[in-house]
Image (tube, rainbow, N blue to C red):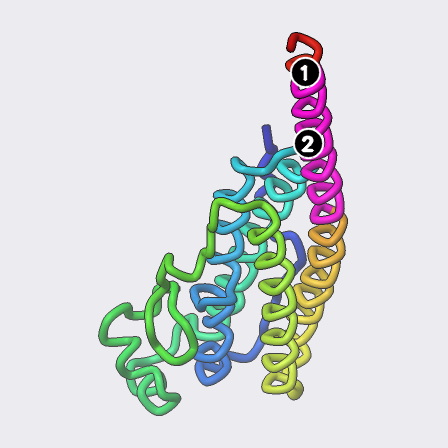
């Protein structure tokens, strides 16, 4: 089992509030390529993996994504903590404030709420791992865009860069898992073919 340490995976201490940035960064909390989607996708896909290494990879990365969800939520919270309704409206968060106040709510930067349709669980380990590789690249690209938007605020850029680097590591681990699963499935197919040939030979001997 996991041991929960009551600290963020990477420290976040934002000194200057900026609701405008929070509106963009929240996409990595509840957007289609965000951390909530990644965690649920990987933790759901792991059950159908054909080998223990792939299951463990999905379990580990899916759990780490929960830590990243906590980080992104913390960034959004620190950027908006204590702002007034007027400040929220002036920074384009008037509708958000109306529905959610200053709570951190899972939605994309465009405003639409989290939708489980983005999880892409297909019941095929190769398709799932290919989707995971693409998901990590999309998350990396999103973090790079956010870093561009936040380049004047080093307190925000620093944890975003950390999160971007973790997406690269996850991409590498999923590549390794995909190769392992492909080898495992090829081994199973060969074993099945050999058994089929053996049965055919036995039937011919009987005749």
For image coordinates 65% across by 78% down, the residue present is 144
The residue closer to the viewer here, 132 or 109, is 132
> Quadrant where the C terminus lies?
top right
For residue 199: magenta? yes
Name the residue located 62 percent from the left edge and 37 percent from the top edge: 55
Who comes first in sequence, dot 1 or dot 2? 2
Could you give the CA–CA distance between mark 1 and mark 2, rounded to whole angstroms? 24 Å
Foreground residue among 71 and 194 = 194
Q: Please tell me whether mark 1 sits on a helix, a strand or a loop.
A: helix
Q: Which residues are magenta?
A: 177-201
> In the rendered view, does 14 fall on the left or right side of 44?
right
Percent x, y of residue 175: 73, 54
The residue singled out by tag 2 in the image is: 188
Q: Would you name the residue on which mark 1 appears?
A: 204
Q: Identify which residue, 60 or 171, lies in the foreground.
A: 171
17 is within the stretch colored magenta: no
Assign the N terminus to one quadrant of the image: top right
């Amino acid at each position: 089992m996991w041991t929960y340490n009551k600290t963020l995976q990477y420290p976040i201490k934002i000194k200057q509030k900026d609701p405008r940035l929070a509106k963009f960064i929240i996409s990595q909390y509840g957007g289609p390529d965000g951390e909530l989607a990644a965690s649920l996708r990987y933790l759901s896909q792991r059950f159908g993996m054909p080998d223990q290494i792939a299951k463990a990879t999905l379990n580990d990365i899916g759990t780490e994504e929960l830590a990243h969800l906590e980080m992104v939520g913390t960034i959004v919270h620190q950027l908006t903590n204590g702002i007034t309704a007027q400040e929220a409206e002036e920074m384009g968060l008037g509708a958000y404030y109306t529905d959610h106040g200053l709570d951190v709510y899972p939605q994309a930067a465009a405003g639409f709420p989290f939708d489980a349709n983005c999880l892409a669980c297909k019941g095929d380990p190769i398709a799932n791992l290919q989707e995971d590789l693409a998901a990590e690249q999309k998350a990396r690209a999103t973090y790079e865009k956010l870093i561009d938007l936040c380049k004047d605020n080093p307190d925000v850029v620093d944890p975003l860069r950390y999160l971007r680097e973790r997406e690269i590591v996850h991409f590498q681990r999923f590549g390794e898992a995909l190769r392992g699963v492909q080898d495992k499935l090829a081994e199973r197919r060969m074993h099945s073919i050999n058994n089929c040939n053996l049965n055919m030979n036995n039937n011919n001997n009987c005749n």
